[in-house]
Amino acid sequence: GFYHLLGLEGDVEKATLHYIIRDFDRHRFEQRKETLRKLAQNLRDLEPRARIEVEIHDQYYNMKEKIEPHREIITIAERAYQSLGISPCIQPIRGGTDGSQLSYMGLPTPNIFAGGENFHGRYEFISLESMLLSTMVVVRIAAMFAGTSVTHVPSE
């Protein structure tokens, strides 16, 4: 987990800090929010004339707790990769705003390989080869869920 300062604005009268807080574990996530509240209270205690406020808006939660009861979706994705000669590498990652939102609305949606590199940075990119592979994986997963075989998978 982490605290990430996204922005800092200020002048003589007022300063505003914008953070995102992330953690894989819900309990530690809640602890991180409480840490920020305590820090603000400590600052208020040090300088009672200061007006220090903390606003926390939950954006999304880790989707693991919604995915685990439906492990079969991971199994199907693994089989789709393997059928295309790709060795799946399953590991927890941060991110997945869309997948998390969908999962918490009742549609378990794990993150899968999208082919990109250097996500959310100025050097983010995807190669044509990776885009093709990710397309093939998605088509294969859809066919497996539909219970059909894929007669034509996009290729070079």
Image: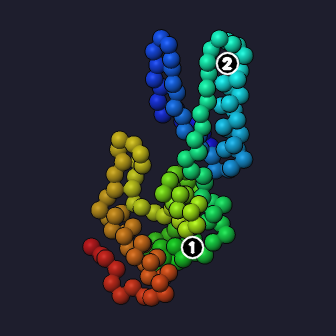
Task: Report which residue position mark 2 lands on.
Answer: 43
Q: Quadrant of residue 43?
A: top right
Quarter of the image for the N terminus: give it.
Answer: top right
Tag 2: amino acid? Leu
Residue 60 can be seen in this image: yes
Q: Residue at x 66, y 24 (%)?
A: 40
Tag 1: amino acid? Ile
User: For the residues carrying marks 1 and 2, which lies nearer the camera in this image?
Assistant: 2
Mark 1 → mark 2, Cα distance in angstroms: 47 Å
| Residue 110: % across, % down | 54, 64
Identify the mark nearer the N-term, 1 or 2: 2
Q: Residue at x 39, y 85 (%)?
A: 150
**In terms of secondary structure, where does tag 1 sit?**
helix
| Residue 27: % across, % down | 72, 47
Quarter of the image for the C terminus: give it.
Answer: bottom left
Packing grade of label 1 (10 A; few <14, some 14-19, many >=20) is some
Q: Residue at x 63, y 46 (%)?
A: 23
